[in-house]
Every structure is written in C-alpha cells, then in structure tokens.
Image (cartoon, grey):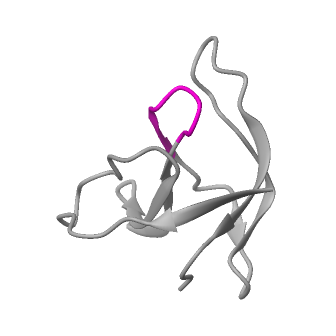
Amino acid sequence: MVVFKKAAGLGPLQAPTEPGTWRRWVHGPAGVETVSIRCPRCLRAIALPLHKVLGTGQITPSIVCPHDGCGFHEHGLLEGWP
C-alpha cells in the first residue's frame, strides 16, 4: 500500500505537484468533490472521480495510473484524511 501525503499551499484549482501527494479536488461541471494525486512513478496528476475514500483514508478500489507506459497499480492511503 502506498501512503500519499497531503499537499499543502495549493490554490483551489491546482493539482498536487510533488510525487506521492494528494489534495481534494472539484471535478467536472457538476462540481463533484474527489481526490487528485500525483503518481509516484510517472509523476503526472491523476484524478480519482470513480474512487471512494474511506474514513481511514484508504482509497477503494486500487489506483491504476491511466498514463501510457506508467504501469502504477497499487492500493492507496491518504495521510491526513480528511
């Protein structure tokens, strides 16, 4: 399981910039609140609109990076959730 640290000091529309970090994110025109992470492998941002975050910070289902050639696929835990 990969532990993602809470990103700090970001504006309301910024994705996390450091690999292995997370932040709350308002996704799409419906304004659905979700989580965005920075992939620790390919270093690109990943929005998780179809994932659920449990009260413990555990993300379900597992995280699969959608970026070509990355291959990151792990279970995740958001440190400092909520």
Is residue 18 in sight in this rendering?
Answer: yes
In the rendered image of this protein, does residue 81 appear above or below residue 30?
below
At 33% from the left and 51% from the top, the residue drawn is: 15
In the rendered image of this protein, does residue 49 appear above or below residue 69?
below
What x and y, as percent, mark residue 66? 62, 28
At 73% from the left and 85% from the top, the residue drawn is: 56
Name the residue nearer the viewer: 1 or 11: 1
In the rendered image of this protein, does residue 24 appear above or below residue 81?
above
Name the residue nearer the viewer: 73 or 49: 73
Magenta-drawn stretch, dominant element (helix, strand or loop)? loop
Name the residue nearer the viewer: 61 or 32: 61
What x and y, as percent, mark residue 64? 72, 37
In the rendered image of this protein, does residue 1 appear above or below residue 56?
above
Q: Quadrant of the N terminus?
A: bottom right
Could you tell me how many numbered marks the image carries? 0
Name the residue nearer the viewer: 18 or 25: 18
The quadrant in which residue 52 appears is bottom right
Q: Is residue 13 left or right of residue 36?
A: left
Is residue 30 in sight in this rendering?
Answer: no
At 69% from the left and 59% from the top, the residue drawn is: 51
Let me know if residue 18 is in the magenta part. no
At 64% from the left and 20% from the top, the residue drawn is: 70
What x and y, as percent, mark residue 26? 37, 65
Chain part drawn in magenta: 39-46
Q: Is residue 2 left or right of residue 11?
A: right
Residue located farthest toward the top when viewing the structure as drawn: 69
What x and y, as percent, mark residue 55? 71, 88
Residue located farthest toward the left when viewing the structure as drawn: 11
